[in-house]
Image: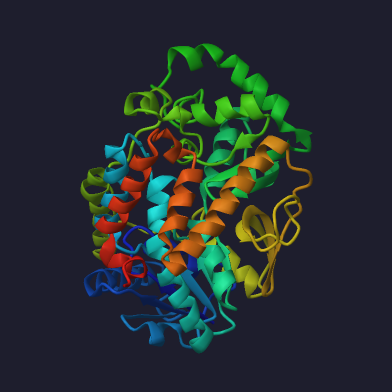
Amino acid sequence: MKITVVGGGSYCWTPTLFRDFICTPGLEGAEIVLQDINAKHLSDLHACCKAILGQLGKTRRFKLSATLSAEKALRGADYVILTITTGAYDAMENDLKIPYKYGIWQPVGDTVGPGGISRALRNIPVVVKLAKQMERYCPDAWILNITNPMTTLTRCVWRETDVRCIGLCHELYGTLARLQKLLGAKDWRKDFDCVSVGVNHMPWITRLKYNGQDAFPLIRRALAKNTAALSTKKGAGTAFDETLVGSNQVKFELFQAYGCLPAAGDRHIVEFFPYFCTEEKQCEEYGVKLTRIEDRRNGFTPRWKERVRKITASEEPIKAECSQEATSKVVAALAGVAEWKDIVNIPNEGQVPGIANGVVVETMGLISRDHVYGLPVGDVPPAILTQIQRHAANQEMTVEAALTGDRKMVLQVMLNDPMCGSIRDFRQMEKMMEELLEANRRWLPQFFRR
């Protein structure tokens, strides 16, 4: 078995994914190849992964290599893990700061809103190119995509190539872990039976059972007990306080309004419902903070790099256990080791009624040998179905615009996007779009052909 990590120089993802691979039953003996376009990052992560093998006593049980060559990494691969970002922080800085000038506050800016749209326009052609290379070098391989915007990137692979692709996101886990604490459960994977439907970073739990009992009334009662905390601690809590109010206020407000529970972090959810984030102060009132590019450059990345350094120098012990990430379990299931049930982004084949076939949706799925099946969600409440239809249509247009360089379609996508709706002047919308395209010009050649 050959597992290739494209973007293997990721200080954030690679140490966790690699440890999961070597700790997952059934993957022993695999060849794991790290591929990246940055030689320094690749060298650092190759050394880190070698150290992980050494710490866990598995140096002889896995074959590890690193290469800058996409052809060498892809040739004969069975599974390709995708973790990239076209333009890195330089491009993302434009995605955040330009909309900010027009009064749009994006806590993340990687899925919807002007930042998510801009990111998709850069990443889609790169991902399609990779998938076409796979058609040549490893046509039977699967892509396991953890790159954002996940829905559009997964969709473009299925639309433009014969390569099979699954999008994997961990946001649902965070919501279920918080519900576990709120309800006093022991293990959400064993105690909860969840039906979830939506698009990435905006899935909705439409039904939830806790040890066979409808959990929604239990959640409402638990929230009612915390009404006082909700009003007195507004914006002051954390995701892990005893009330779980702090960074979950938005999802609980929407749960009361819709009767179903959004199952992603609030910082993602508010980008689908910008009424919570019309100005920075209001975002913070709901426990949501903007992640500035300076936070990423000066906070996130240095911490990730320091962890890689410590692992490589054997200063940080590595536990022989898997993380909550599903990637290695999905690989094992596709290889026929054991079936696995998890949240997946795959094309609709009837699992979501009211959504066109082929459109990528996020639902629970069953993964078995060389197959993934989206589990039926049943009837979707009309208000939620409308939300899914709106974003699914916008994501279809985003893929088309990214591949054709159609500026008018980009404008249509932005006009349809809820977060962009805070711009009240049509001319300003078009001006913002042009400014984003121009700022990221070197990564968007399709929009600047004569």
Q: How is the image coloured?
A: rainbow
Instruction: Name the residue at 47% across, 57% down.
Output: 409
Query: Which one is in front, 154 or 222?
Result: 154
Residue 90 spot, x, y in % from top left: 24, 56
Q: Is residue 71 left or right of residue 311?
A: right
Instruction: Name the residue at 45% across, 28% down.
Output: 276
- For the C terminus, give its image quadrant: bottom left
Instruction: Name the residue at 59% across, 65% down.
Output: 330
Residue 97 location, quadrant: top left
Residue 220 location, quadrant: top right
- For the N terminus, give its image quadrant: bottom right
Residue 110 in sight from this viewpoint: no
Residue 133 in sight from this viewpoint: yes
Residue 307 spot, x, y in % from top left: 28, 56
Instruction: Name the residue at 27% across, 38% down.
Output: 101
User: Is residue 179 shown above or below 161?
Assistant: above
Query: Count the marks: how many?
Result: 0
Query: Which one is in front, 254 or 368?
Result: 254
